[in-house]
Each structure stands twice: as C-alpha cells, then as structure tokens.
Image (cartoon, rainbow, N blue to C red):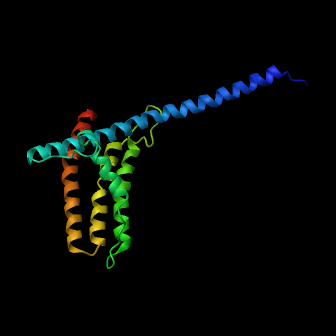
C-alpha cells in the first residue's frame, strides 16, 4: 500500500493538534489555581504591609521604608531572610519533636486546601463535609507549634509555643463560628 506524503503530513499535523489540545486543557485547569494562589499571596503581602504601616503610625515611628517603594517588599525580604537562616537544633531537646512540629503545622494548612474547588472540573476532594474537614484539618496547626516548643526542652521556648498555639486558637474560634454560621444558613 502506497501512502501519499500529503496524507502523512495531514496525519502528523492532526496528531500535533490533538497534543496541543491536551496541553491547552492542562493549562486551563492550572489557570484558576495559579490565579487563586497569586491573589492570596498578594492579599497577604498587602495586609502585612498595611499592618506594619498602621502600627508605625500608631506608635509614631517610621515604618518599613527601605525595602522597595514605601516598604512594599519588606515581607519578601523577611521571607528571604527566614529561608537563609541557620537551622539550629537544641542539644538537650527532642530533635524529632522539634523538627516534626513545624512540618505538622505547615502540612495541616496545605492539606486543608484539598477541599477547595479550584474550577468546575478540578476538585481535589469533593466531600459533603468539606467545610468541617477544612476546619478540623486546619485546627491541627497549634499541635505542631506545641510540639516544637516542647521538643526544645527549654521553658521559654515552650512558653513561646504555648503562646503561639493560644494565638492560633484564638484566631480560629471566631473564624470557625463565622464559617459554621454561614454553612448552617446555607443548609436551609
């Protein structure tokens, strides 16, 4: 059987077109995710900048002004500084607890994103109890803070871990009440 070269070119161009459709499908699945992550990141940066500027105004001092225009890049400078800090482990503490604690705090927050629908077709976990799972999983973060404070075998670090956990819980209680009131209203 003899195949014409124009037929081969047509078949090749069709297969390229099909692969491009798959690539475009993947891109359009990822666009809502990147949009959401970018929006949250920019929102956090603006809130941190506003908090620093308002605190500086209340305390009658100069706020962050050297990192970028009006100190906008101060949060990025702080994040970069944290990435390059030296990792110290306590000599007399429990290094496993001290190391696992921050991992539990971060993983619980990242795991809570699994119930958020990113688009109509891209839902990681379609659960009927999504809001309650989100609340329960994100409430595990204070446990990681307590583990780190306790694992250091230092009473001041333990008190700091207790304080951080108490702050986290005090922020979660009003948030949980707001979310539950909205979900109870939606049930009707």
Q: Position of residue 16 (x, y in %)?
A: 68, 28
**In the rendered image, the vertical position of residue 90 relative to residue 181, given as above or below:** below
- Relative depth, front residue between 68 and 152: 68
The residue located at (36%, 55%) in the rendering is 106
**Residue most toward the right?**
1
**In the rendered image, the vertical position of residue 66 relative to residue 4, given as above or below:** below
Q: Is residue 31 left or right of residue 58?
A: right
The residue located at (22%, 60%) in the rendering is 164
Residue 71: image quadrant is: top left
Residue 129 in view, yes or no: no
**In the rendered image, the vertical position of residue 65 relative to residue 84, given as above or below:** above
Q: Position of residue 97 (x, y in %)?
A: 35, 70
**Residue most toward the front?**
66
Q: Is residue 33 left or right of residue 188?
A: right
Q: Position of residue 168 (x, y in %)?
A: 23, 55
- Relative depth, front residue between 18 and 176: 18
Residue 96 in view, yes or no: yes
- Relative depth, front residue between 42 and 27: 42
Residue 85: image quadrant is: bottom left
Quarter of the figure with the C terminus? top left
Quarter of the figure with the N terminus? top right
Q: Position of residue 150 (x, y in %)?
A: 27, 71
**In the rendered image, the vertical position of residue 165 relative to residue 96, given as above or below:** above
């Amino acid at each position: 059987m003899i195949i014409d070269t124009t037929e081969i070119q047509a078949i090749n161009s069709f297969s390229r077109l099909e692969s491009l459709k798959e690539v475009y499908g993947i891109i359009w699945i990822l666009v809502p995710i990147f949009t959401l992550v970018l929006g949250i990141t920019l929102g956090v940066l603006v809130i941190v900048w506003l908090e620093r500027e308002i605190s500086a105004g209340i305390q009658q001092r100069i706020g962050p002004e050297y990192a970028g225009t009006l100190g906008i890049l101060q949060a990025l400078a702080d994040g970069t500084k944290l990435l390059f800090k030296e990792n110290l482990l306590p000599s007399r503490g429990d290094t496993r607890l001290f190391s696992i604690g921050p991992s539990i705090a971060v993983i619980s927050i990242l795991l809570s994103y699994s119930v958020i629908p990113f688009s109509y077709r891209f839902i990681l976990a379609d659960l009927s109890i999504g809001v309650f799972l989100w609340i329960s999983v994100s409430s595990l973060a204070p446990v990681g803070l307590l583990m780190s404070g306790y694992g250091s075998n230092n009473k001041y670090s333990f008190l700091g871990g207790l304080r951080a956990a108490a702050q986290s819980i005090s922020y979660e209680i009003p948030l949980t009440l707001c979310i539950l009131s909205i979900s109870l209203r939606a049930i009707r």
